[in-house]
Image: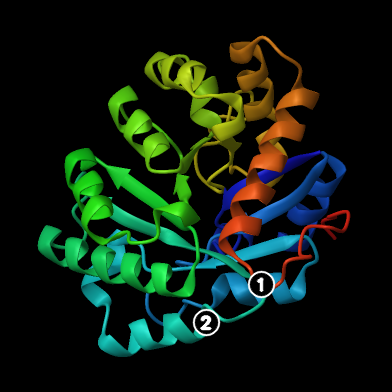
Amino acid sequence: MFIDSHAHLDSVDFDSDRALVIERARAAGVARVLAIGSGTGPGTLDCAIKLAERFEGLDASIGIHPHEARLTAEEDFRLLTELAGHPAVVAWGEIGLDFHYDHSPRDVQLEVFARQLKLAADRRLPVIIHTREAERETLRALQEHWTQPHIGGILHCYSGSLELAESGLAMGFLISFSGMLTFPKAQSVRDVAQRVPLERLLIETDAPYLAPVPHRGKRNEPAFVVETAKALAQLKETSMEVIGRQTAENYRRLFDRGYSRDPGRFTRDPVVQ
């Protein structure tokens, strides 16, 4: 049993066969998928909620990605606060900083990131962090504005330094690895993954992006998270079953701790339909 802790199932890439994608995930042994709700920014902030209402086995997040920070208005923060009360919502994200593409001005990214950290803390929701070429600024923002560190969160699709990973772990975050673990030139990512304790790891696809070997170059989908589990098992010199069981337990522990309105949420056997 595996859990894909990060997939953009709202993407137009899945419009033609979304139900089949979710069915293939179940057939591959993927028990749950966290549908990321940043969408294309304001106007689509409930996209993951709509999917979770339609498909069994999906959890939802909400949030404004740094790419769309420049589009954000005050009413969007009010809407996010309302959406945070939906029973499908288990996390706030992905949020953070992206100084590689700079689709939004950096000062605007920082402001929107800080606002969302505060709102997530108020609602006691774990945060899902995106950071690219902004490690120092991301850590500073978390240290200044993440006022509920015991709730935790995820450093997602990890490709950063060992120092960032260690800082994140010290702040109570889990580290999530994607199909990049399978890329021949991603040895630095594998080196970090080897150092992260098994009980602090998650696996994800970031679908439809970053399809793992042997699917590289194709559209990624949640069923392919099994390949990331396989790569992680090789790094940790253990079995895929151990990786699946532990990362699923890590996922449940994070969201049981941070999201208390439905304490029995993960007591049932999760299935994707």
At x 63%, y 68%, the residue is 260
Residue 104, numbered circle = none
The type of residue carrying mark 2 is Leu
Q: Residues within 10 Å of mark 1 (few under 14, many from 20)?
A: many
Q: Is residue 226 visible?
A: yes
Q: Residues within 10 Å of mark 2 (few under 14, many from 20)?
A: some
In the rendered image, residue 44, in percent from the top left (x then y), is placed at 47, 77
Task: Tell me: 77 left or right of 108.
Answer: right
In the rendered image, residue 64, in percent from the top left (x then y), is placed at 37, 68
The type of residue carrying mark 1 is Ala
In the rendered image, residue 65, in percent from the top left (x then y), is placed at 35, 62
Instruction: Provide the residue designation for mark 2.
Output: 83
At x 58%, y 37%, the residue is 202
Instruction: Provide the residue designation for mark 1.
Output: 88
- In which quadrant of the rendered view does residue 173 lie? top left
**183, above or below 135, in the image:** above
Question: Quadrant of the image for the C terminus?
Answer: bottom right
At x 24%, y 45%, the residue is 139
Is 170 or 22 nearer to us in this picture?
170
**217, above or below 46, in the image:** above
